[in-house]
Amino acid sequence: MHLIQRMKIWKELRRLEQRAKEQPSPSTFVDLGQVYINLDLNDKAEGLAEDGLALFPKSIELRQLLDCARRGLRNRRAAELRAKLTRAPSPKLFRELALIQMDLGDSNALHATCQQWSLRFPDDAGCWLMLGQARLTSFYRDLAAREGQEAVQCLERAVGMDPKEVQSRRLLSEVLYRVGAVHEAQKHVQVLREIDPADQEVEQLLSHIATLTDTGAELSVLLDEVESHGSLRNASLEAAQPAPSAENSISEVRTGLARVLELAGVEKATFIRGSKAMVKGQIKDGRDPFLRIVRVTAKAAHRFARRLDIGSASKTIVEGDFGRICICVFGEALAAAQCASDCDVELVLSELQELVAGALHAVEE
C-alpha cells in the first residue's frame, strides 16, 4: 500500500476512534470496527463490538460485527496452526484446527484435516470423533439418513479405537436413542455409567431410556423413517423433562432482588440477562446510568480477565463518589447493586452470587 494511502487510513481511523468516544452509537462502533477488520486488527474489532453491545445490547449490526471479528480471528488462528502442522504435526494441533474449521462451518477443510490426521496418527481416535461430530451436526440440521449413517459409523469407529473415551460414546448413545435404537443406546449408556458412576446426567438418561420401547428395526430403517417423517423419534433428555414454570422463575428473581435491596446501605439492585433487565430500588428508567455502568464494567472486566488468561471476572466492585457498585456474573446472568461506601460488601456480593446462581435458567420476562 502506498505511504500516502496508509496515512489517510490511519488518519480516518483516529477520527472514527474519537467519534466513537464522544458520540457512541451502533453506527459509529460498526464504522470503526469495519476499519479495524480491513486493517486485519480483528482483536480490536472484537473488543470494540463487545463494548458496543454492553451499551446497545439489542443492536443486530454490532452482533454481526462481533461475529465477523471472531471469524477473522479463527481464520488467522487456523493459518497459524496449518503452518505449525507443516513443521511439527501432533494430534493436539490437528484437534484444535479441526475444532476451528467446525466452528467456521468449513466441511471440506475439516475432512481434509481429518484425513491428514488419520494418515499421520492412525492410532488416534480423535479424527473420527471430529468427523462424527461434524456429520452429527449436519444430521440434526437436515435429518438426512445418509448423514446420520455416516455419523454413527464415525462415532462407532472412535469408540472402537478408544473404548474409555467418554465424548464419542456419549454422542453415539444420544443419536441412537433419538432415532429409536433404544437397546443399542442403552448398552453405551451403561458403559458410560461404569466409567463414571457419579455422572447424574448419565443416570437420568439411563432411567429415561429404560421406560422406552425398542421397535427392533434396523438402524438404516430408523434413519429412513426419520428422514421421511422429518422428525426424530425421541426428544432430547432436556426436552423430555418437565420445564420449570416461567412464573416461578421470574418470581424467584424478584424475591432475590428484594432480598438484596433489604440489605443495609443498598440503594438499587438489578438482574440482567441479555437485553432484559429487572430492577428494584431508586431507579428512574431504563436509561439510568447505573444500568449502563453495570453492563460496561461487567464486559470490560470479563474481557480483561480473558486477555490476561486469569479466569473469569465473576465478582467486581466499582468505587466512586456514588459509593460502591457490586457486580456478580455467572454464565449469562448478571446481578448488581449500588450501595453506600460503608456497607458490608461481602454480604452484598454473597446475596448477588446466590441470586445469579439460582436464576441461570430463569425465563426472560
Image: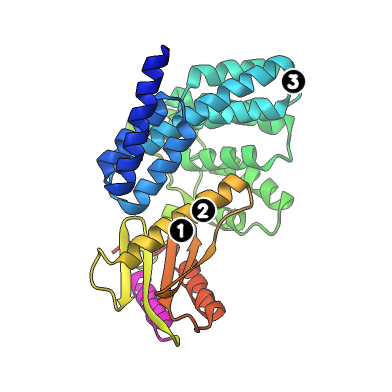
Q: Position of residue 223 (x, y in %)?
A: 45, 30
Location of residue 105 by image quarter: top left
Q: Which residue is mark 1?
A: 298
**Location of residue 118 by image quarter:** top right
Looking at the rendered structure, which numbered label has been put on residue 121?
3
Does the CB distance between marks 1 and 3 fall below 8 Å? no
Q: Residue at x 57, y 20 (%)?
A: 79
In space, the residues marked 3 and 2 are separated at their CA atoms by 38 Å
Tell me which corner region of the image, top left, top right, bottom left or bottom right, holds residue 163: top right
Residue 216 drawn at (x, y percent):
52, 38
Of all residues, the one furthest to the top in this rendering is: 2
Note whether 307 is above or below 288 in the view shown: above
Say which residue appears at 44% left-offset and 59% top-offset: 297
Left-right relation of 288 to 125: left
Left or right: 107 with respect to 52? Answer: right
Quick one: SS at disc 2? helix
Closest to the observer, 106 or 149: 106
Q: Magenta region: which residues?
A: 247-262
* Tag 2 near tag 1, CB within 8 Å: yes
Residue 250 - label: none
**Residue 156 sits inside the magenta stretch:** no
Q: Which residue is mark 2?
A: 302
